[in-house]
Amino acid sequence: ASGGVTVEKVSAALSSTFTTTNTSLTDITGMSITKPNITDGQVMTSYSVVAYNSNNGYGKQVDLIDNTTVVCGGEDTQSGDGHQDIMSGSAVSSADGTTLKLQCSAPSGNTTTIRLEANVSLGILCCLGVG
């Protein structure tokens, strides 16, 4: 057999806390990467963020977007003391060089914050391409 396997990792880490009151999905600053472009390749993408809502009892939404399509994520409707959750997800897709990004939104009248948690390496968006 000739040739070899191509493996490429791309990642982004949150460098500061992000806050939004927008009820529509909004790009989380710094949480965007370009997938590897590997002929006949696939990528495994995962993310983890700490999301906080200003009011108890209201949900938060964090989505992974591939180019313009939501491929993973959704609303966290859990409530409880602290209003904070670790939200994570993963997806497999083609290694086609498109943009992956995280977006979030806030319920009406609320603020959603994606917190920088340096001591536990959150938030992170990571993609591993193989082909």
Image: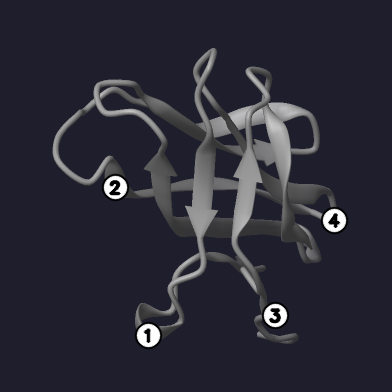
Upstream in sequence: badge 2 or badge 4: 2
N-terminal label among 2 and 1? 2
Marks 2/3: CA–CA distance: 36 Å
Residue drawn at (48%, 57%), measured in percent from left and top? 47
- Find residue 120 and report its horizontal and vertical position in percent: 35, 80
Q: Which residue is mark 3?
A: 6
Are the residues tagged 4 and 3 within 8 Å (C-beta)? no
On screen, residue 5 versus residue 50, left or right, reads right
At label 4, counting other C-alpha atoms closer than 10 Å, the crowd grade (few under 14, some 14-19, many 20 or more) is few
Kind of residue at badge 4:
Gly
Q: Amino acid at mark 1?
A: Asn
Q: Which residue is mark 4?
A: 97
Q: Nearer the viewer, residue 12 or 16?
A: 16
x%, y% of residue 32?
75, 57
Q: Secondary structure at mark 3?
A: loop
Mark 1 = which residue?
A: 119
58 in relation to 87, above or below: above
Instruction: From the image, state whether disc 2 or disc 4 is nearer to you.
Output: 2
Q: Quadrant of residue 66?
A: top right
Viewport quadrant of the C terminus:
bottom right
User: Which residue occupies the foreground of this view, 102 or 107?
Assistant: 107
> For the residue marked with disc 2, what is the amino acid?
Asp
Q: Mark 1 falls on what kind of element?
A: helix
Q: Residue at label 2? A: 85
